[in-house]
Amino acid sequence: MNLGGPRDSDEVFPFLHRLFADPDIIPLPMQKHIAPWIARRRTPKIIDQYNKIGGGSPIRRWTERQGELMSALLDKLSPATAPHKAYIGFRYAAPLTEDAIQTMLADGVTRAVAFTQYPQYSCSTTGSSLNELWRRTTELDSEQRIRWSVIDRWGTHPGLIEAFSQNILTKLASYPKDRRDSVVILYSAHSLPMSVVNRGDPYPPEVAATVDAVTKRLAQDGVRNPYRLVWQSQVGPSAWLGPQTNDAIHGLATQGHQDQLLVPIAFTSDHIETLFELDLEYGEEAKKAGVTGLKRVESLNDSPVFVRALADLVRDHLAEAKPVSAQWLLRCPGCKNDTCAQTRRFFGKECVSVPLP
Ligand SMILES: C=CC1=C(C)c2cc3[nH]c(cc4nc(cc5[nH]c(cc1n2)c(C)c5CCC(=O)O)C(CCC(=O)O)=C4C)c(C)c3C=C
Ligand SMILES: [Fe+2]
Ligand SMILES: [Fe+2]
């Protein structure tokens, strides 16, 4: 499960329309009517951005590759639960959640793991995908032929931390030796509206936990660079969690820190937020402003260490035979969304006994 992205210009409007129509990510007054209007207004700008990164989002290509590699590895690591097959359920672009369920039913699948590809949990991302999975499952699989369990977060999994750390070490090594130790590491995550943060969304502390775990892992290799966690991609005029990545780059450069290494810490593959926003928008602005040493760490994409982490996560989850985590059962203190309660009831209770094949 992931957000998904348009593969070409024609898919941009439907993608944005679904996104702005989802109250789990953006609650709007008269949402049904306003969503197509906002999506239509935003479409030309976003088409232009996708055109600058090759015409569309690579998120589907990467997710397919990650799924294939993970399944092949899982067959070896967990022969008792083989064969394994990855299906993609994107929230706002094809293949959608309902496409995944329909294909799985046609394939005769009876046991499935809803595996979020967002390592850190937010109600606006994984929460929205699970709410959609519950809605579509109720509609398309009323007999519950597919038994579900959920991997809802994995932001401090040792394999994930190792994959991030190896990519950071590789990029740090590209700085001249005499400057390497003073490169500022800027961990950049997608921001959240403050209304979501104040509701008690667990995403900000979970992203910070990932950063902390990577920092400790890097120290094992003697890397103790200064670092900050910063937030990118805010949309619209409301207050969002900061500091914003772009402001941080310029603020630190003004203080004399020319060497800065950007690390996308809440995405597992390349897409518009890395290829356009970090590389083109922020990168080019920084160059114009005279920031000379800004670089970006590679996204995890098909890193073998990362693929192994995905396979280990599923293997351990299947061995544990627990349908959901206790942490996921706890809703945000400020949650008023009844769907969140129903989804938890469904995955947490009705699917309690999940026999392995
Ligand atoms: C951890 C990942 C993400 C969080 C958290 C997140 C929250 C969030 N996003 C919006 C609004 C938009 N996001 C858009 C694109 C987009 N968002 C993520 C990830 C997270 N979003 C990704 C990976 C992508 C890009 C997909 C791709 O290209 O493949 C967009 C569309 C682009 C645009 O119009 O700018 C919007 C809109 C909100 C409001 C939000 C938190 C509530
Ligand atoms: Fe987003
Ligand atoms: Fe909620």
Image (cartoon, rainbow, N blue to C red):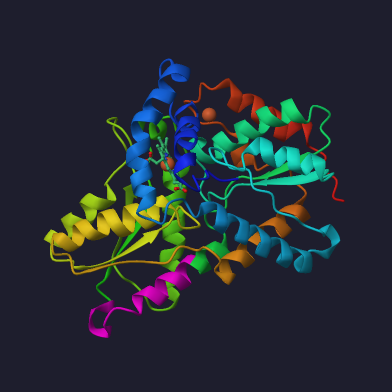
Q: Residue at x 87, y 51 (%)?
A: 357
Quadrant position of ligand 1: top left
Can you name the residue that lies furthest to the bottom here?
A: 177
Q: Residue at x 61, y 32 (%)?
A: 132
Residue 11 position in % (x across, y down): 49, 40
Q: Nearer the viewer, residue 314 or 282?
A: 282
Q: Which residues are magenta?
A: 164-180
**Quadrant containing the N terminus in the rendered view:** top right
Q: On the rendered structure, is 111 left or right of 120?
A: right
Residue 195 position in % (x across, y down): 37, 29
Q: How many marks?
A: 0
Q: On the rendered structure, is 52 left or right of 214?
A: left
Q: Is residue 63 above or below residue 291?
A: above
Can you name the residue that lies furthest to the top here?
A: 30
Q: Is residue 169 above or below residue 309?
A: below
Q: Is residue 172 above or below residue 92?
A: below
Q: On the rendered structure, is 193 left or right of 82?
A: left
Q: Nearer the viewer, residue 7 or 199?
A: 7
Q: Is residue 46 visible?
A: yes
Q: Residue at x 34, y 38 (%)?
A: 44
Residue 223 in which image quadrant: bottom left
Q: Nearer the viewer, residue 199 or 276?
A: 276
The majority secondary structure of the magenta stretch comes to: helix
Indicate whether residue 53 is drawn in magenta.
Answer: no
Residue 109 in which image quadrant: top right
